[in-house]
Amino acid sequence: MDANTLSYILDTFFALFAMTLIILMVPGFAMLEAGLVRTKNVTAVLTVNTMIYSVASMAFLLIGYQLAFGGWENDSMSKWAAFLFQMAFVGKTVNIMSGGVSERTRIVPLTLFTIVMGAFIYPLVVNWTWGANMLEGTILDISSMHDLAGSTVIHSTGAWALLAAILIIGPRKGRYVGDKIKVIPASNIPLVVLGAFLLWIGWFGFNGGSVGSISTKENADAVALTIMNTNTAGLAGAIAVGLIVYFRYKKFDITMILNGALGGLVAITAGADLFDIYTPILIGAIGGALVAFFVPFFDRLRIDDPVGALSVHLINGIWGTLAVGIFADVSFLDQLKGVVVVGIFAFVSSYAVLWLINRFVPFRADEEEQLEGLDISECGIESYPEFKRAI
């Protein structure tokens, strides 16, 4: 077996293994969201996550992949492995959105939006950054932005769509009453913990796999460093939020600590391959602190985000991308330009599509359905039928 064949086989296996880790994030999002919503909406949340993975992946297979990359050719590994690795990412953009609009959103319109995101919106962002680059040579060319695994391309894109959706759909019934913010507690903390750690493990494939190759000593070191830095940022985010909430409230809020870890992971995603082993501590800690600050900030703005996705994915997607321009030998202006171009496109296009769908197939469940729970009205199956459901 010659060296080129061996490299092809190793990199194919590496892409497939990384893809498998990333798919672990599907149950990760599902369990995290199922634990954070009320018991009367758990089946609906699980159904939405299942539909997102299925529909977004199929849309990417049929339309999105070729739009993003201009074809299926790949000389360094099996083209099927290259596709599967990229396919594993696409549903995450809508997973980020779905949790933030849970407990008041119907499944059918959200599925329709998933088709558009998987086939067009996300692939266009990929085209401009990682792919065929139809903007090459224009003033909007953002291909020089360094975004290893998608702090902006994936996390911010999904979160901009979430912000557009919240503005159209509005908050959950009873969440804001006058000047008061009603606390709606998580229904299942063990599921929240399980989901967060599945996401954390999946991130090793998310970032490590984005190095692209493991078949040489240099590439193997790069993959290992990337995964190490990814884990470090998550640790720092969790510790930072743990300290902040303890000093502020004299309590340890596990949901905030886990969101701090996820914020650190989002923040390191853009540049985990570029930093030394200490810089991710600072980047992750700042990411965690941003989560602790922005979760109550969005509530003060009456932006109802049950899972804290805007704080984790939007704010830290922006921070992580800009951090590359601060801590690595990369142009800060190129990073800022990428954040702005993707942000404007993702928000405006998502808002337009969501508004159009909403005109014909309303996203928002009515008040009676929200009161009863979407498990009954949308799915006809309750996750916890023996429990007395909270209103």
Image (cartoon, helix red, strand yellow):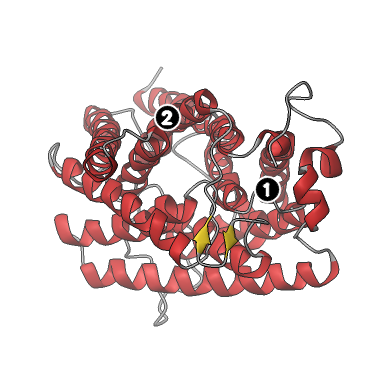
On the question of residue 142 being in view, the answer is no
Residue 109: percent from the left, percent from the top? 78, 57
Could you tell me how far apart the alpha carbons at marks 2 and 1 are, in whole angstroms? 42 Å
Residue 246 placement: quadrant: top left
Please tell me whether residue 101 is drawn above or below residue 250 in the rendered image: below
Q: Local crowd at mark 1 within 10 Å, few (<14), some, or many (≥20)?
A: many
Q: Which residue is mark 2?
A: 11
Dot in front, 2 or 1: 1
Asked if the residues shown at circle 2 and circle 1 are in contact, with their CB atoms under 8 angstroms apart, the answer is no
Q: Is residue 18 left or right of residue 247?
A: right
In this orientation, which residue lies closer to the viewer: 176 or 47? 176
Q: Is residue 355 left or right of residue 378?
A: left
On the question of residue 325 being in view, the answer is yes
Name which residue lies at 54% across and 26% down: 191
Q: Quadrant of the C terminus?
A: top right
Residue 285: percent from the left, percent from the top? 22, 45
Please tell me whether residue 303 is drawn above or below residue 259 in the rendered image: below
Q: Which residue is mark 1?
A: 103
Amino acid type, callout 2: Asp
